[in-house]
Amino acid sequence: MHFFNTLFNFAVKPGEEINKIMQERRLTLALLGYFSGALSLMMMIALESGKKFSSFGFTAGTVGFLFFNVCIGFFFSSSAHLFLELATGKGRAAGLFVLIGLSEFTKTLLVAFALVCAAIPSLAPFRIIIVLIVLLFQTLVVLFMMHKAYGLSKISTFFALVASFIPSVISLFAFGILMFSFIFWMLSK
């Protein structure tokens, strides 16, 4: 019931509720958001693939997406927190992690698209466009919440978001390259 009260307060008074979420740092709420995003991605893939997934495959895919979403949220919230704290002198990294987790609820739109696509197969070629639109919508939700939480102008919030996104992406790519290099090195030995 607490989740629905938070959702209602977020719709009625978004600024107050976002600041309350930032202060309380409800990690269970963040993990629920990350889980719903991972489950939505896996459900979209399962609905659109047309083949049956085993319970283990579906669960493993969901856990994999959950791990990936949490890692992305962790890297993004830590780098965004640094830039926003430098710009505003206030903020909480854990609160930002929760807000990014809440933005994962936007990925439930992908399940709706997959269901519509199952009913109208001619929409399947638009999958990439819809996924990009949903990711853009999620970015706008994050921008809105960061704007309310940190009190920056919309342009400053956008540039802080972009500036914090770059180190996150570089870190993830560097980790991936190092991991593949290590595996290649181990196999070639």
Image (spheres, rainbow, N blue to C red):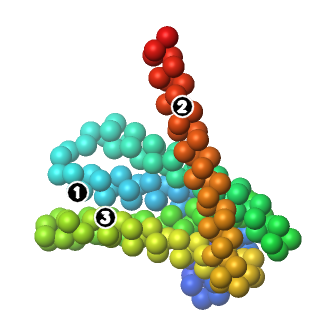
Picture coordinates of residue 113 (x, y %)?
Answer: 28, 69
Query: In the picture, residue 79 is in which quadrant?
Result: bottom right
Is residue 152 left or right of 123 when viewed as pictured? right
Q: Residue furthest bottom?
A: 12
Q: Which residue is drawn at 53% across and 38% down?
A: 176
Is residue 148 left or right of 66 when viewed as pictured? right
Q: Distance from label 2 to label 1 (Cα)?
A: 31 Å
Q: Is residue 51 above or below residue 91?
A: above
Q: Is residue 53 above or below residue 74?
A: above
Query: On the image, numbered disc 1 is attached to which residue?
Result: 48
Disc 3 residue type?
Answer: Ile
Query: On the image, numbered disc 2 is attached to which residue?
Result: 179
Q: Mark number for residue 68?
A: none
Q: Can residue 105 be seen in this view?
A: yes
Q: Is mark 1 on a helix, strand or loop?
A: helix
Q: Residue at x 86, y 71 (%)?
A: 89
Q: Which residue lies furthest to the right in this view?
A: 89
- Given this view, does label 2 or label 1 mark the residue nearer the observer? 2
Q: Is residue 165 above or below residue 10?
A: above
Picture coordinates of residue 83 (x, y %)?
Answer: 75, 65
Q: Is mark 2 on a helix, strand or loop?
A: helix
Q: Foreground residue, 131 or 66?
A: 131
Q: Earlier in the sequence, mark 3 or mark 1?
A: 1
Q: Can residue 29 be seen in this view?
A: no
Q: How crowded is mark 1: few (under 14 residues within 10 Å), some or many (20 or more)?
A: some
Query: On the image, numbered disc 3 is attached to which residue?
Result: 128
Q: Earlier in the sequence, mark 2 or mark 3?
A: 3
Disc 2 residue type?
Answer: Met
Q: Foreground residue, 161 or 43?
A: 161
Q: Distance from label 3 to label 1 (Cα)?
A: 13 Å
